[in-house]
Image: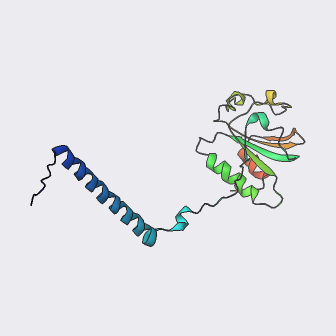
Amino acid sequence: MSKKVQYQTEEQREVIHFFIVLVVILIIVMCVYIFSKAFVFDESLFEVSYEAGAIKDERAIVGTIFNRPEKEYYVIIYDESKGNAVYYSALTSKYSENEKALKVYHVDLDNELNAAFYVGNDGKSNKNASSVSDIKLKDLTLLKIKNGKIEKYLENITEIEKELAVTK
């Protein structure tokens, strides 16, 4: 009887070892996949729901204050980076709760597009502006626009509160 002796080189042993490790890793990955599919997988994680988006158009720039879609509305203009901006925003929010409230647009003087119209508290504002190029604004201004023209121009917080029928 003759026995056949097989000789293996180092490279052959490495290749066999590589395939054994590869098969073991594939078996482990398949077991984890089957386990997660059977016991852990929650399809609700992958449900996609869509919500209708809403465009917030309460913000405006000075260049658009005369051509809003409503016939009559207010535009409150102030620097939103200042501390009293929160009060002005709350004031208009409280006014907007009124059933007969007109639409209120907010213009931020801190916005670079509006900076050219700002003259500061020491400057002279133009209460009779009939176009965007004529507008000059102080720190706080409330405009009542009717049919594309300024009907009221208020710069005093007390007058603004009275106009909006909101008190402290």
Q: Residue at x 65, y 35 (%)?
A: 111
Residue at the far left in the pictured view: 1
- Image quarter hosting the N terminus: bottom left
| Figure check: 52 above or below 8 | below
| Left or right: where 112 falls relative to 73 | left
Front residue of this view, candidates 106 and 45? 45
Count of residue discs: 0
What is the x, y in percent for residue 158?
73, 48
Please provide percent x and percent y for residue 28: 33, 62
Q: Is residue 25 visible?
A: yes
Where is residue 77 shown, x and y percent of the image? 72, 40
Q: Residue furthest bottom?
A: 39
Can residue 166 be seen here?
A: no
Indicate whether 11 appears above or below 162. above
Q: Kindly indicate the quadrant of the structure image that contains residue 127.
A: top right
- Residue 25 at x, y = what percent? 31, 57
